[in-house]
Image (cartoon, grey):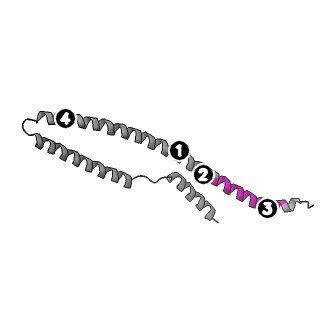
Amino acid sequence: MTIETPSQHGEHSPLRRIIGSVFAILQTRLELVGIELAEEKDRLIGVLFLGLAAMMLATMALIALTALIAIAFWDTYRWQALASITAVYAIAGIACALKARSGLRNAPMVFEATLAEFEKDRDVFRKP
């Protein structure tokens, strides 16, 4: 049976404190990642719900508008009216697709705060 003396225990103390600090920092950063994931999930669910509601209501409005225009021009310019409506819908669809693509390309970086904290931690450990 070995008995540890205070000098043996003291030699490992700074190393254990450093390792403990590293694990504490990692735990804090992982908690930050979890919080950011939860916030992003909540934001995306809200945006998805509003987007679906907007699409449903816009579709209903477009159906009613199409029927109204078709009825108004049925006796005189039936196919021209329907062709014009189709062209307007196609142009609007292309514009929405381009806007969505632009929104995806210009989206903010995910986990930006976590990456900034990791960068700060790395800088602290690099300093002599």
- Position of 45 compared to 19: left or right? left
Query: Label 2 neighbourhood size at 10 Å, few (<14), some (14-19), many (20+)?
Result: few
Residue drawn at x 50%, y 43% is 39
Q: Position of residue 95 (x, y in %)?
A: 26, 49
| Earlier-in-chain disc, 4 versus 1 | 1
Mark 2 belongs to which amino acid? Leu
Is disc 3 placed on a helix, strand or loop? helix
Tell me how many marks there are: 4
Are circles 4 and 1 on residues that touch, CB within 8 Å? no
Is disc 1 placed on a helix, strand or loop? helix
Question: Principal SS element in the magenta part?
Answer: helix
Is disc 2 placed on a helix, strand or loop? helix
Mark number displayed over residue 67: 4
| Earlier-in-chain disc, 3 versus 1 | 3
Residue at the spot of label 1:
38
- Position of 14 compared to 114: left or right? right
Front tag of 4 and 1: 4
Residue span colored magenta: 9-26
Q: CA distance from mark 4 to mark 2?
A: 55 Å
Quadrant assignment, res 8? bottom right
- Position of 69 compared to 128: left or right? left
Mark 1 belongs to which amino acid? Ala
Q: CA distance from mark 4 to mark 3?
A: 82 Å
| Earlier-in-chain disc, 2 versus 3 | 3
Residue at the spot of label 3:
12
| Earlier-in-chain disc, 4 versus 3 | 3
Residue at the spot of label 2:
30
Q: CA distance from mark 4 to mark 1?
A: 44 Å
- Position of 115 compared to 51: left or right? right
| Earlier-in-chain disc, 1 versus 2 | 2
